Image (cartoon, rainbow, N blue to C red):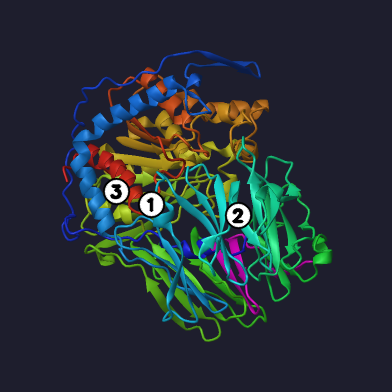
Amino acid sequence: MKYTTLIAVLAFGLTACQKSDDAPSPQTAPEATTPEPMESVTMQEPRADKRPHEMTLHGISRTDDYFWLRDDERSDPDVIAYLEAENGFFDEAMAHTEEMQSTLYDEMVARLDPDESSVPYDKDGWWYYYRYEPDKDYAIYARRKGSMEADEEILVDGNQRAEGHDYYSLANLEMSDDHRYAAMAEDTLSRRIHEIRILDTQTGEFLPEVIGNANASIAWSADGDYLFYLDKDPETLLAYRVMRHKLGTDPAEDELVYEEKDNRFYTGLGRSRSGDFIMLVHRETETSEVKLLPADQPLGEFRIFLPREAGHEYSIDHANGRFFIRSNWDAENFRVLSTTDLATSADKSTWKEVIPHREDAMIREIQAFDEWLVVGERKDGLRQVRVIALDGSLDRYLDADSESYVMWPGTNVNTDTSTVRYGYSSLTTPTQTWEVDLQTGETTLLKAQRVLGGFDSADYSSKRMMITARDGTEVPVSLAYHKNTALDGSAPALVYAYGSYGSSTDPWFRNSVVSLLDRGFVYAIAHIRGGQEMGRQWYEQGRLMNKKNTFTDFVDATRALQEQGLIDPERTFAMGGSAGGLLMGAVVNMAPELYHGVIAAVPFVDVVTTMLDESIPLTSNEWNEWGDPREKEAFEYMLSYSPYDNVSEQDYPNLMVTTGLHDSQVQYFEPAKWVAKLREKRTDDNRLIMKTNMEAGHGGASGRYRAYEEVAEEYAFLVDLAGMEK
């Protein structure tokens, strides 16, 4: 969706990227050493009771001995005791790395700019921005009237709002059109269930009404009298009801505007960038639908722009009385069309083509301006920005100076302008915010992310290579390494990937990775099928009945790096989270010999059982991603790769598994069951440890600094296994 939220436009760059004084010198990368076994653990590893649970479908019976670890209330004493026993075992197993964890953490936070702030943007004469204060975890959202020289007015101090909570997230902050009211969506449990509060900036006080059980999406009516939001299903946690709240009234009296009956669809809500419309978007993996309501008619009814059609994905932007439609109608990689008449928008034959479909480039997003289109494209596996004059006088790509990079349309809240912001980053280049004048072509660097602690981009190298998968497909791999690290087969390596939902893993600069590069690691991103790095077909080749391509691509990429003599086969590590954790679970079943250690973060590993249970959040609307196991063919295919169902009596690499008790995306019991079964079946004596964050959910710890504690713990696991003492 192309509507703008204050949180969304200020979000980029929340984590700066720097380096500490006590880190290894960039000029002297550590020499490779032979990995030593991790210190022995005296505490006996936990063993979960086996309580057989029988399941039969399509004539196939399965016995799940650890099904009992599922407790939807998170209060069963036996379950909590087991998780706490695993945590105790984890702590003891990692105790000898505490100094390393501390060193890594200190390096990472030393690279952070203590006074990090966003590039301010102007909306109706108000300059909005966020900033951090030294040693504080959460951003402060503020504004100034007229110019940045005016007095600061703080809207939200995340540090104050987080007090008394183990977890805090300000997921959205929306200003009313007159800039008086600030509506904010806050999550204090990490299950993406939000409370919405409304701040009156004239009085500095919150209005008495508090809206609970809400999605983070918020949209104001033009007059500021009404607030639209999404109510969540308490069981599936899907946002499914659109509610209208009148300021100053009890939320219990809020009116139901629309209810989504098809639980395969996600629902989103916001304002168009023009501000003229409130947009309601419904989408599932391969189908979408947009409804519009004039923002100055809050008591009216939403009008369907184009009814949902199976297999048709579209999104719209609006500027200067014209709708621009990004659509895959007869266009696998999408094209852009337009119309000016909402009354006939449901007739696709009235749409006029603006940007035709191309086989070699996929259109990711569009930003419409009164006289321009800014297009985020993916071409040759890289994110690029294309700018087009609607009068036909200009059509060009913005320049990049790296072999492997990321470029994206930036924060552009006004449509009546010819100056456009865009962002740039690479594995060795911290995030930059640029502005281009589309009339003159002149570019201006507005902000380069400050990286402290002696970091110098010139000390690092990055490259992009292609490997050949087993079916002949060429798969891109991005590499980053210290310039003193030889790619001669002696360097330890961390191979990372995701590979699902069409979500691409782009070569961003990552603060934490610098600590690995400084220790002589090679960091590799395998751009495997299931993402969209190489266009829509890349995604299609890695989902549903093609899902195994995701796993074999990763294995083949790892093997190619080893066989080409670029990385040390004895010190090759892998990491992935969520659906990337599914990837980790699959590859350790398929090719455990390739990896000395694996980190599986919040891993989705019990694919079949979860996809059969519609009471679990986010199940039914993911059938078009994984398959519907109620169908025999899909059931058998999913069962053939589901990590939990395929644990066998074999050697596994060293494994670190993390989860969150309150995770609403991947329930804690999936990794818990997986670890319990691994303990039962494996034939090795390698390290197998699991940590459950008893307060957090899918995103782990909140806070700018606290999040690095978890990363430092994970990297200490890798560095220790690599045989490094520092």
Left or right, 433 with reference to 198:
left
Query: Toward the viewer: 693 or 183?
Result: 183
The answer for how far apart the CA atoms under marks 1 and 2 are is 21 Å
Residue 225: % across, % down = 68, 64
Residue type pointed to by label 2 = Ser
Residue type pointed to by label 1 = Gly
Residue 411: % across, % down = 52, 69
Residue at horizontal 19 percent and vertical 35 percent from the top: 96
- Residue 217 is tagged as 2
C-beta proximity under 8 Å, tags 1 and 3? no
Residue 342: quadrant of the picture:
bottom right
Residue bearing mark 1: 703
Q: Decide: few, some or many residues near mark 2? Use Cα within 10 Å; few <14, some 14-19, many ≥20.
A: many
Q: Which residues are magenta?
A: 351-378
Query: Toward the viewer: 13 or 313?
Result: 13
Residue 157: % across, % down = 42, 60
Residue type pointed to by label 3 = Leu
